[in-house]
Image (spheres, rainbow, N blue to C red):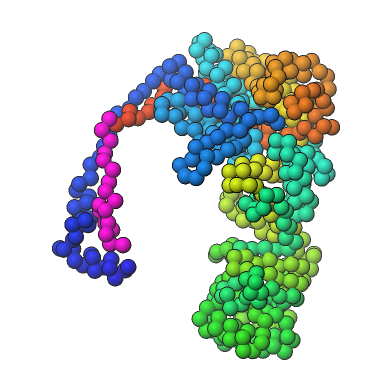
Amino acid sequence: MMQRFSSSISRSANFSKNVLPATAFMTTQHRYASGKDIRFHTECRELMAKGVDLLADAVQVTLGPKGRNVVIEQSYGPPKITKDGVTVAKSINFKDKYMNLGALLVRDVANQTNEKAGDGTTTATVLARAIYKEGCKSVAAGLNPQDVRRGILAAAEKVVAQLKSSSIMIDTKEQITQVATISANGDTEVGNLISTAMEKVGKEGVITVQDGKTLHHELEVVEGMKFDRGYISPYFITDAKTQKCEFENPYILLSDKKISSSNVILPILEEIYRVKRPLVIIAEDVESEGLATLILNKYRGGLQLCAVKAPGFGDNRKANLEDMAILTGGQVFSTEEIGHKLEDARLEHLGSVKKITISKDDTVMLDGAGSKDAIEERCLFIRSAIQSTTSEYEKEKLQERLAKLSSGVAVIKVGGANETEVNETKDRITDALNATRAACDEGIVPGGGSALLYASTVLSTLKFDKFDKDVGVRIVEAACKVPCATIVQNAGGQGAVVVEELLRRTDKNTGYDAQNGKYVNMIESGIIDPVKVVRTAFTDAARIASLMVTTEATVVEIPDENPPPAASPKAGYGGDMF
């Protein structure tokens, strides 16, 4: 390919008919520009409100235990059936650019809530619509939009403080099951799966959701460390049927440099030969003569050997190797330590585990020989690093390392009859998992929208010296009723009637069980929401919707009536080169 590329360039005077020189291609390009369309005042807010209404109408049908599904057309594959609010919001785009502005801003509310809490996106969407619509009415009546916004934000802070003060921390398996079941739309099987997984790997443990291969959901728990690197060569396979390499009680040699020479590993291979135990080498890479030496000794020398690439890159790889050293009771042969050469390695420098299973894609080490005190000290170090870092990427990697060291990995395999069913279920399980983690972080409050409803009662005493700010407070007070009313309406009830009845109750744990159509103690009945989810949904909705209320002009591009022709797939560089 490279030869053909270079020869094509060298024959610049003899281009084929279908391949143009770069200069010829550039001179044929034209820039197409279009004008801008600007709308002002009430008109621009009303146009945005149409987009907000349509998007919120599509999203809110999924809210509550009796919420419906939404079918989404996809550019490839079968249509997607989902009950996940943010998935519905992401799929919506309008041809009208003003309507699309409103839809995109409310979609941003759902996205932010999903990123921070992992659930509550439908609640955030209906709250944003409620605040924006009432805010637009106030501004159209002549109120100052900035003062209205200040009132909205002040009220939001008061409601959030009330939510936090009424939260209940959870620690039992039954409470975790209830949170997961509610978030999965009443699916008790999903609730039990998630609570079992968290019981096995702990609250900090890694729980992943994958497509299964059966009709039923499965939970696989890995008690140990698992990383996504497999054997370097298939010659190391010990079980031809499963295509895996498995050893009992092997030594573990760790190195953060490439092993390409046989001289550096021959001394340790001689010691391994004497003790007749397996050896697994985890290094940056094992190649050429070093790899050939291992394979030769496996087949002709009778040694049980395997080589695996270390996970991660750069500093993250070194940190992972150090974690493995703590877990296995060994040490890392590092290029940075002078006088600490790999050829000087002895058995006392190696780690060990009770069992190791290596496939072509991943490695699982079970029951390392490292001391529990050293592992706990390492976990404390990683926790402090998580609190001090500001990088989300670095925080994610640190959390993965902490989970591998502290508790292992649980994998939920989602079953189903076809791809559509599996994807729909996977969305619900992912939401439920995120909600459960959020509940473990900040606690729970009564569900069904009742927590926001009761928290809004503190706003009756919030007064300002400006009428416009007071209107902002009343907007938030009214918006807090919407999630509960929407859940009731989706269940076929009268939302306004239920809301008024709940506000007359003195017990703040009372709510409306939309599944069974009766008033119950929500905590005792297990109808609960994570504080983090409710707080995040409400805060994001209030901030973005109140900002939208201050809009006084919108600018969009006018579509070009004569768009440029589609470029020929053979035009420019490389049309026929490759």
Residue 576 placement (x, y as % from top left): 27, 59
Examine the structure image and report whether residue 576 is included in the region drawn in magenta.
Answer: yes
- Residue 325 versus residue 572: which sits nearer the camera? 572
Examine the structure image and report whether residue 191 is included in the region drawn in magenta.
Answer: no
Number of callouts: 0
Q: Quadrant of the C terminus?
A: bottom left
Q: Is residue 296 above or below residue 168?
A: below
Question: Image quadrant of residue 2?
Answer: bottom left
Please report the residue visible at 59 percent of the width from the left and 37 percent of the height from the top: 82
Please report the residue visible at 70 percent of the width from the left and 80 percent of the height from the top: 278
Which stretch did the figure color magenta? 561-578
Can you name the residue that lies furthest to the left here? Answer: 13
Can you name the residue that lies furthest to the top here? Answer: 141
Please report the residue visible at 56 percent of the width from the left and 28 percent of the height from the top: 58
Q: Main secondary structure of the magenta part?
A: loop
Please report the residue visible at 64 percent of the width from the left and 43 percent of the height from the top: 425
Question: Image quadrant of residue 345?
Answer: bottom right
Residue 49 placement (x, y as % from top left): 50, 21
Q: Is residue 422 above or below residue 563?
A: below
Q: Quadrant of the N terminus?
A: bottom left
Q: Is residue 118 above or below residue 146?
A: below
Residue 43 visible, this angle: yes
In this image, 319 relative to 578: left or right? right
Residue 103 placement (x, y as % from top left): 49, 29
- Residue 497 versus residue 397: which sits nearer the camera? 497
Question: Image quadrant of residue 487?
Answer: top right
Residue 539 visible, this angle: no
Residue 210 placement (x, y as % from top left): 63, 52
Q: Is residue 375 above or below residue 249?
A: above
